[in-house]
Amino acid sequence: MGLPTRAEETLIVDEDEVKDIIQRWRNTPEEKLKPEDYQQFKKFGSVCLTGGDGAQLLKFLQDEENRGIVKSMGCVLMTPLVNEVVKKGKSLDHCQAAITHLTMTCSPDELMHSLLQLTEDIDPGAISETILTLLPHLQTVLLLLQLEDGKAARLGSALGALQQQLSRLPVPYSSQQEDEDEHGLCRCYNALINFTKPFVEEVKRKIGSSVTSSEDEELRTELLKFCMRSLREPLLEAELNRDRKSSLWLFATEIMVTLPAIQESLSELLFFSPLKKSPQTDSSESKESRACLAYLLFVQLITIDSFPAVFSPVFVLQCNMEYINQLLSSKKESHVLKGLALYEKSLENVQDNSLPVSLQDLKSFYSAPQNVRQVLTDCPMQNLRETGLQVLQLSIDKLDSEAKHKFFRCMLKTSHHAGVESYIVKNIRNQVECSIKQCNANKWFLGEELLPLLGLVLSLPQGAQTDLLNSMDKIMESLNLLRYLLIRDTDLRSTIVWEKLCRIKDEYLKILRVCISISRGYYAAELKALRQDQKIKAREARDAARSSRLVKSITVKKEKMSNMSPEVQHQVLQSALVTFDLMESLIFRIEEITDEKQKSQKLN
């Protein structure tokens, strides 16, 4: 049985010459074959496939007379055969059968080399089809190897190469994208699970026999690396929902089941970090993998039933803080979402008002709220900001009084954002109100320790030059707190707070009045100038002239006034004047309450 004769570019061979070449190959020992022989054999096979003669090529490979040729040089046909399968050409079935025959005939070492070469520089449009084609044959070859033949290292090389190629594909971010699986990523990862199952079972058998070798440990390590890489990608990027058992959810479940199956304790991986000590694992990548592991366990509750119940909620929170910070410090939406969800779930089981101030000395407990604050102030996505605010409040609720006090001080000093500061001021009022209602006048929110907080709340760091428009959230909330404290003066007069509060109040209101006066004059002038501009018909020329006016330096919510339309500028300036009126009305009410209290004291 011979190969057909065809012309391909410069290769023109007649039938008799082909027969002579094949006969020479049959009579030549493998070690005597030259590189030119391998190249020519590959060309003959490629010519067959190009011409649709896959059936004839298969017959040639299966011919017992050609067994020596196939065993020696058959591996060079892997690339054209796999490419033909990926293209789903006319000879698809014959090519599949030919690949299967080669895997059972050729040297496993040569086969592994040829198959792994195919995983390099795959065309982006053919990644999934190429991997799905290779996986069953790679598995067959690996199962033919013994552990002492370097099986574990070859498995590791194969998994690493395949996952490297899959990392080039986009991870579906919505359920619709996952269902469509346009790029085949979901199919490939599910196929990878089936690919690894025989090796997982092999590890389980060896562990069960209580007799393990260094080769067994190497195989277990390669499977662990595969699981950790899978946690980082695609699972850290994927949208997962335990109410919807999608293909990536099922893949996540398989990974979480595989880890304990190969004797990797989830609690040790998460809480005692054995991978940190491994020189083979990048610390940042390892932390991302373990962060995803914590998310799958505590948020999605995958395998939570088998997780030890001996760990206290505070211990779990403390350990998870490392992963929460890792996720929240990322710029990727999927990471931040998982970080917020993990933070929330880790806090839920902690008793309210129980976390001591000593925990805030830990870097992770300091960094997590700061990362949440950054989400609130810098993230453009409203859903993340809303979730971040809920998590921030939950974290505040879990702190004891002293810890809350320290946290509020820290946020007021470091946030540099009026919206966040106003939220903290509102929380301070809630704590004062709670202390009064419970008749539990603790020193942190009714005693002398309240004064440092009030000093930060009732302050204008830029003095009379403060931008009231951008600071109005904090200022309005601060004035409301001040009014509340003055109304509840009987609860404060029993302490030494009252006298110092009055001094802080007088100084604050004095500067604030000056600031309002300056700002009102400035904004009123700008509003008048803007109205005049709108009356001028030659708007373009006038706008160019006005570009040098001071209004361009005004910034509202991080947007410069000069970038706004005239209509929006008008609304902003008008709103500023209304805000100043509100501030003045609150100041007037505060002074009114103060006068009433003083008159009442004189009468008494």
Image: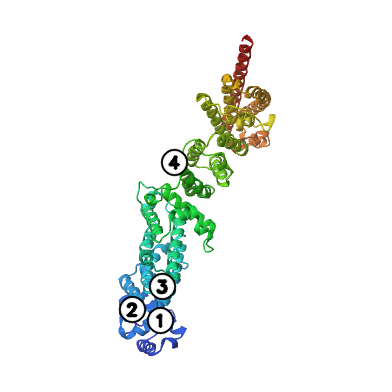
Q: Mark 2 points at which residue?
A: 57
Give the residue number, with chain letter if any, for mark 3: 147
How far is the residue under mark 4 from the one under mark 2?
Answer: 66 Å
Of residues 591 and 446, the one nearer the viewer is 446
Residue 222 appearing in the image: yes
Task: Give the answer, above or below, for where 599 lies relative to 132.
Answer: above
Distance in Å between CA atoms under marks 1 and 4:
64 Å
What residue is disc 1 on? 73
Callout 2: SS: helix
Q: Which amino acid type is marked by label 3?
A: Leu
- Nearer the observer, disc 3 or disc 2? 3
Give the number of the mark in front: 1 or 4: 4
Q: Which amino acid does label 4 sit on?
A: Asn
In the figure, is residue 363 to the left or right of 157? Answer: right
| Mark 2 neighbour density, 10 Å: few (under 14) some (14–19) many (20 or more) | many
| 561 or 14, nearer to the observer | 561
**What residue is at 45 percent from the left and 50 percent from the top?**
294
Which disc is residue 349 wearing? 4
Where is residue 340 drawn, in percent x and y?
48, 44
